[in-house]
Image: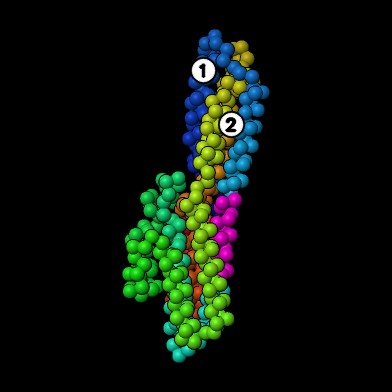
Amino acid sequence: MYIKRNYGFWMTFNWSKRPFIFGLIYSLIVTAIAFFTPFNIALPWQPISIIGIAVAFYLGFKNNSSYDRTWEARKIWGSIVNNSRTFGAAILAFVQGSDADTVKKELIYRHIAWLTALRYQLRLSRTWEHTEERISNLYNSEVCENYYERLDQELMNLISENEFKDYKGKSNMATQLLARQAKRLQELRDQDYFEDFRHMEFHALIRSFYEDQGKSERIKNFPFPRQYASTTLWLSMVFAAFVPFGMLDLFYRDGSAWIWITVPMTALVIWIFFLMEKIGDYSENPFEGSYNDVPITAIARGIEIDLREMMNEEDVPKPVEAVNGFLM
């Protein structure tokens, strides 16, 4: 996620310059044909503008739908933040016994392990995501955050080796961690570390974590419908193909140099439409690890800091810092 006040103009242009360059070349060819040959290839601008209005409406629909996916993902992780704090506070307040401190640490560390496994799973690549444009030097182009190398190391610092081996090879490690947490809470209830009512409260929180995980996985594993995503691209290309011919109708005068204004104006219109299309396209997948995603790594680190400080630990990790304005 980009956290500075604004994207710079040249940063934005560099990200989306290809349609502008293609528009320049294409309109230059069309304009040269009109200027140096006797052929009148200009088309009335009015029907072309109607196509442009229709495409703009469709782009607006796509961008609104894409934004909804990103905002929903942020709300889901906001819920994870709130419920995690509640879970940590409940553990510290409810768990009683001779070795309560050890049990509290075990439960809280397992929860941090769940957060770690979940965010790594959400960073895994999908065929419809923009894996080639993930943040340089922060994410691997094939598997984000070097999943199979770094996840094991992080989890081994949070849970026992024997417990880790139970999860190794499972298709959904985060799910198994929550299942183990629920089983462990039942064991603690049977040993009278807390009463039935408080056990029910713990289980309600486990259910909320499963719900938030499932909602995140729904966004991750179900792409923005391809028929909508593809149609906006093709309609934009159709409109772009007609733009220089309509511009000739506006600027062409016999023997006049005004005709060459067609070139930059066409490139500008094409760039604007494809920029809108690309913004929607890159907002569809809020967990892919690109420049506009939800910063789940920073959010998870913030939760970890809160939980460790609740236990009055001294070796608390620092918040994730932005790199060149980007927070992962």
Q: Tell me if residue 26 comes above or below residue 312 in the rendering.
A: above
Q: Tell me if residue 257 comes above or below residue 82 in the rendering.
A: above
Q: Colour scheme in the image?
A: rainbow
For residue 171, which quarter of the picture? bottom left
Q: Residue furthest bottom?
A: 98
In the shown orientation, is residue 72 left or right of residue 108? right
- Is residue 202 inside the magenta stretch? no
Q: Residue furthest top?
A: 38
For residue 260, which quarter of the picture? top right
The front one of 210 and 231 is 210
Choose mark 2 or mark 1, whichever is in front: 2
Amino acid carrying label 2: it is Val
Residue 318 can be seen in this image: no
Q: Position of residue 86 (x, y in %)?
A: 57, 74
The secondary structure that most of the magenta stretch takes on is helix
The front one of 205 and 323 is 205
- What secondary structure is found at the residue carrying circle 2? helix
Q: Tell me if residue 153 comes above or below residue 294 in the rendering.
A: below
Query: Which residue occupies 53% across, 62% down?
Result: 212
Q: Position of residue 34 (x, y in %)?
A: 54, 15
In the shown orientation, is residue 162 left or right of residue 109? left
Q: Which mark is on residue 32?
A: 1
Amino acid carrying label 1: it is Ala
Residue 217 can be seen in this image: yes
- Is residue 71 inside the magenta stretch? yes
Q: Which mark is on residue 269?
A: 2
Magenta-colored span: 68-84
Query: Which residue occupies 56% across, 52% down?
Result: 70
Q: Residues within 10 Å of mark 1 (few under 14, many from 20)?
A: few
Query: Which residue occupies 65% across, 32% down?
Result: 53
In the shown orientation, is residue 296 left or right of residue 146? right
Mark 2–mark 1 contact, CB under 8 Å? Answer: no
